[in-house]
Amino acid sequence: MPDPCQTKTVPASLTIEALLQSSQPANRMILIGEPQWVKGVIHRLHGLGVVPVSGWTPLLPTGNAGEVISLLKRPRVPHRD
């Protein structure tokens, strides 16, 4: 399985657009920053059991020097009172 923490050269707008289009309610997390920071947050969230590393998009360049973006989309779980 490919490592989502590797930087890809796919236009970020394509991934963002695909994640925003949904017929089902969803929660999203977006990380933007230096590659090492984004990778670190992804791995810390995995270590805490929040989300597997594979749940994130590959690191995509934002167009700003030294900056990447990674996105997570998860189905919305109904809130229980």
Image: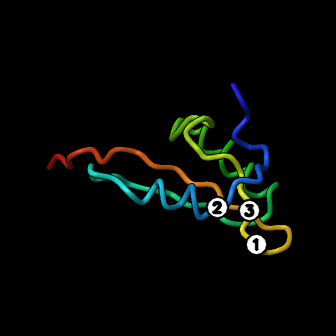
Q: State the SS at label 1.
A: loop
Residue type indicated by callout 1? Gly
Disc 1 + disc 2, Cβ < 8 Å: yes
Residue located at (67% from left, 60% from top): 11
Residue at the image position 59 percent from the left and 64 percent from the top: 13
Mark number displayed over residue 10: none
- Assign a secondary structure to mark 2: helix
Q: Quadrant of the N terminus?
A: top right
Q: Which residue is mark 1?
A: 63
| Quarter holding residue 68 | bottom right
Where residue 28 appears, x then y in whole percent?
Answer: 44, 56
Q: Around disc 3, counting alpha carbons within 10 Å, would you say few (fewer than 14), some (14 to 19), or many (20 or more)? A: many
Q: Quadrant of residue 12?
A: bottom right
Q: Is residue 47 left or right of residue 34?
A: left
| 62 over 47 or under it: above or below | below
> Which residue in the structure is indicated by mark 2?
12
* Sooner in the amino-acid sequence: mark 1 or mark 2: 2
Q: How is the image coloured?
A: rainbow
Residue designated by label 3: 68
In the image, residue 32 sits, relative to residue 76, either above or below, namely below
In front: label 3 or label 1: 1
Mark 3 element type: strand
**How far is the residue under mark 1 from the one under mark 2?**
9 Å
